[in-house]
Structure formats: C-alpha cells, structure tokens
Image (tube, rainbow, N blue to C red):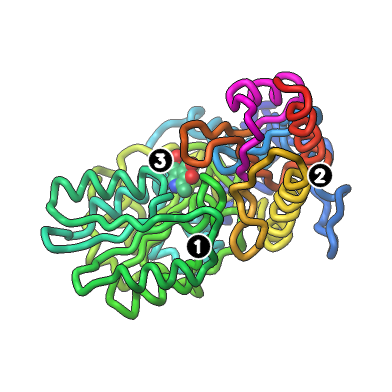
C-alpha cells in the first residue's frame, strides 16, 4: 500500500526495485506537479528552473553549499519514502529480502555511473568511512611512506597520521600552494616525493576548501609506474564531474551520496580496483554483506538503511536523466559567473583559480575585512543565500558551491549582496 492507500502488486514492486528505479510506483507525498522535461541540446535558464522545481527549497532561498550537503530532488525523496513505508509496513525477513535485491541494483547503478564493475563497489555510509577503510585496511608498517596532500579532508589526512603513529609508518605531507600552481606542479611534486619506500599516494580530486582540481589521471599513472597505490577522495567530484574511473585508474576512490549526487544522507561509496582487493583487509566485520565482489567481504556493516540505498540509485537515475555532462557544465557555469562577478569587486581576494582546468564548482574568497560569521548570517537572513563560512587563518572567507538546483539569479543576488556589504559593512 502507498501512503494514500493505493495497492500495488508485490511483483511490480520487486521488478521496480530490481531495476533500481521507483518509476512504476504510484507517486508518494513528494511528487512534484510538473514532471522534469527532457534536457534540450543547449539547456537554458528555463530548463534549469524546471530542474529546480523538482526540489523542495522555496524559490526565494538560494543555498549554494553543495560541497557540504545537497538536498534531494522529489523522485529521491519519494523513493526513500515508499521503500521506508514498505519496510516498516512489513519488517519481516521475507519482505526485507527484496530490499537486499534493491541494494544490488544500486551497486550496479553506482558502478555504471563510475564506469567500473559492480564487483569493485562497496556501499559505505559516507566518504569518511570509505577513506578510513583504506587507511585502516592496508598493511603498512615502519619504513613505509604514505604521501598525502595538505588540503585533504581530515578523513584522508588526520586519519593517515593517526594510524601512522600506531603502526610506525611515515606520512609525507605535500603543500597545496595558493593560487593553484597548475596540474604539472603536482605531478612534479609527487614525482620528487616518491621513494622506494612509498606505498600510497592519497589526494583529493577537487578540494572542498578552495576548489583546487588535481590532475587525478596523471597522478594515478605516475603512482602506478612506481608501484604506489592511489587513494582519490572524490567527495567533491562524484555527482559533479562526469567521472570515468576506467580512464582515471585510481586504486581506491570514495564519495558520498548526500553531496553532489543529491542522494539520501549517510550513504557513500568506496571503489576498489579489482587488482588490489587482496591487499585490503576488511576493518568492519558484521552481518549482511553484499552479494558480489568486494562487497561480500568488505560490506558487512550490520543493519543498513536500505531505503536510503534505494534512494541513492534513484539519485543517480535522476542525474542520468538530466545528463551528466549537462550537470557538470551547469555547475561550472554558475561557479564561473560567481568568480567573474566577485573578481570585479574591490577588496575581494579570490582563493579559487578561474582556470577551468584548475577549478570546477567551488568558489572561495575573502570578502575584504568583513567579519565572516556576521556576513554569513546576514547573507542568510537578509538575502536568503546559504553558503559556508571558512574561519581560521588558512584562506578564510566565504565558500559558494553552486549545483544544478541553483539559478543564475541566485548567483547574481549573492554577488550583489557581497558588493553591498563591502560598501556598507555588516
Ligand atoms: C574532500 C572531502 N572528503 C571527505 C569529506 C567527508 O564527507 P562525509 O562527511 O560525507 O563523510 C568531505 C566533506 O565535506 C570532503 O569535502
């Protein structure tokens, strides 16, 4: 039964879940009155407004914080709602077995999305867990070296140093200068840092701090040539950049459903290349493993939120319907417009490089001498713009990270508001 009491057959439901889509089910409470139109060849603002219409955010609210957390569109909310209703309406083992089948459908969808095989996919709870499965799961000991990049997230930075203190290996931290010095700088810096003792290179594909894009393919190739494993944190590219891991060839890659894919909260992914499965020990051992490949040994995390995992599959289907290149182009266009507008303002110091080869859709800047906490609060209160404050002494300021649900009008409003506060103060 659905929320409205409409019956649907078990067979339909099983078929739908096996397909990894809730398309055949009657609409739930989040269904939007207007369906998503087909993506035009050259999608303009009207199309993106229709995309925005699939999200619950009211038209006057412009939240540009995708690098932190994204909202889910209606089809994802609906899929989660309906699967939750099904599970809670019949929590028997018999009924929940069908949800496990749906989990495998999501695994296939994630693999297709990343252009790899389902045997190489573990459905984690987030990027943090995926990153830590790697730093905890590899055999590293005294004498070994791990190269990390200074701007990595704590789950790919502090995690390594903490485990190094326990197991006796050494962490070499390479600086990430500002402004972004170009991809070749990083290839050369890593080339110089690799020694016969280097076992792992761990970096972030697109940093959440100032949006630096690293040359992932070239770094993975360099590491491979030296027998070094690569751990690529993709939290800020998965669901934003039209990724092809078969081309990038990392050994490990991580991401979260609740960021750029606009999926449910607390679902994530660890990709591990088939050739390295034998080198990764499982670090969490419990019940309810996955059915194939690495998931059989590395995904037994105990009871999961299967409806959220089903929603993850629906989120990827939503992106596929729009077109992944169109989404990447759109997010980049919004960020480029923000950079262009902000660079014209006296007093603004941009931390993000405007070159599209060095940045994507994260825009960080210092707004003169304005107090960051007060400015962020004023933007939300007066201008209905949500963004991330960056405190501390390391490139402090404001971060805008726009995505497919944002509009050019929101970018203009945000830039206009920054200009006004620079003139008037906050
Ligand atoms: C680059 C990067 N890695 C990892 C994470 C952690 O993601 P999660 O909180 O989903 O585990 C984040 C979160 O902002 C991030 O920006």
* Residue for point 19% across, 69% down: 197
Instruction: Give the quarter of the image for residue 292.
Output: bottom left
Q: Which residue is mark 3?
A: 94
Instruction: Give the quarter of the image for residue 174.
Output: bottom left
Magenta highlight range: 363-386
Q: Is residue 342 above or below residue 336?
A: above
- Residue 15 in view here: no
Q: Is residue 123 above or below residue 329?
A: above
In the image, taking residue 382 as reference, residue 95 lies left or right, namely left
Q: Which mark is residue 214?
A: 1
Q: Are marks 3 and 1 in contact (CB under 8 Å)?
A: no
Which of the two marks, 3 or 1, is nearer to us in this view?
1
* Magenta span contains residue 365: yes
Mark 1 → mark 2, Cα distance in angstroms: 27 Å
* Residue for point 54% across, 58% down: 180
Q: Position of residue 82 (x, y in %)?
A: 59, 35
Which of the two marks, 1 or 2, is nearer to us in this view?
1
- In the picture, the quarter occupied by the C terminus is top right
* Residue for point 86% across, 49% down: 45
* Residue for point 57% across, 31% down: 389
Is residue 195 or residue 55 the one in the foreground?
195
Q: Which residue is mark 2?
A: 408
- In the picture, the quarter occupied by the N terminus is top right
Q: Which mark is residue 414?
A: none
- Residue 37 in view here: yes
Q: Secondary structure at mark 2?
A: helix
């Amino acid at each position: 039964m659905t929320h409205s009491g409409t019956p649907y057959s078990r067979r339909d439901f099983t078929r739908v879940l096996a397909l990894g889509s809730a398309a055949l089910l009657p609409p739930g409470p989040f269904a939007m009155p207007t369906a998503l139109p087909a993506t035009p060849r050259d999608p303009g603002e009207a199309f993106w407004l229709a995309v925005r219409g699939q999200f619950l955010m009211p038209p006057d609210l412009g939240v540009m914080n995708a690098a932190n957390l994204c909202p889910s569109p209606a089809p994802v909310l609906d899929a989660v709602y309906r699967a939750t209703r099904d599970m809670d309406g019949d929590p028997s083992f018999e009924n929940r077995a069908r949800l496990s089948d749906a989990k495998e459908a999501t695994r296939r969808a994630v693999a297709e999305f990343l252009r790899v095989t389902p045997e190489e996919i573990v459905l984690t709870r987030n990027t943090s867990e995926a990153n830590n499965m790697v730093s905890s799961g590899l055999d590293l000991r005294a004498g070994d070296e791990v190269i990390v990049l200074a701007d990595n997230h704590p789950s790919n930075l502090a995690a390594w140093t903490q485990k190094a203190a326990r197991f006796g290996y050494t962490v070499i931290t390479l600086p990430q200068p500002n402004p972004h010095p170009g991809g070749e700088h990083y290839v050369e810096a890593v080339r110089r840092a690799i020694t016969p003792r280097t076992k792992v290179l761990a970096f972030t594909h697109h940093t959440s701090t100032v949006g630096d894009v690293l040359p992932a393919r070239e770094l993975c190739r360099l590491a491979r040539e030296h027998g070094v494993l690569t751990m690529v944190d993709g939290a800020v590219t998965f669901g934003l950049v039209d990724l092809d891991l078969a081309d990038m060839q990392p050994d490990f890659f991580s991401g979260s459903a609740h960021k750029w894919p606009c999926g449910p909260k607390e679902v994530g992914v660890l990709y591990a290349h088939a050739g390295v499965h034998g080198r990764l020990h499982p670090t969490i051992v419990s019940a309810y493993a996955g059915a194939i490949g690495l998931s059989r040994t590395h995904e037994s995390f105990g009871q999961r939120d299967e409806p959220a995992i089903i929603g993850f599959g629906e989120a990827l289907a939503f992106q596929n319907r729009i077109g992944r290149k169109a989404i990447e182009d759109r997010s980049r266009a919004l960020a480029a417009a923000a950079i262009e507008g902000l660079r014209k303002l006296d007093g603004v110091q941009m931390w993000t490089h405007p070159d599209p080869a060095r940045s994507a859709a994260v825009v960080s800047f210092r707004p003169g001498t304005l107090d960051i906490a007060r400015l962020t609060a004023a933007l939300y209160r007066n201008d209905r713009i949500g963004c991330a404050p960056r405190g501390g002494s390391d490139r402090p300021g404001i971060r805008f990270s726009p995505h497919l649900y944002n509009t050019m009008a929101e970018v203009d409003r945000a830039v206009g508001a920054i200009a006004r506060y620079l003139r008037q103060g906050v």
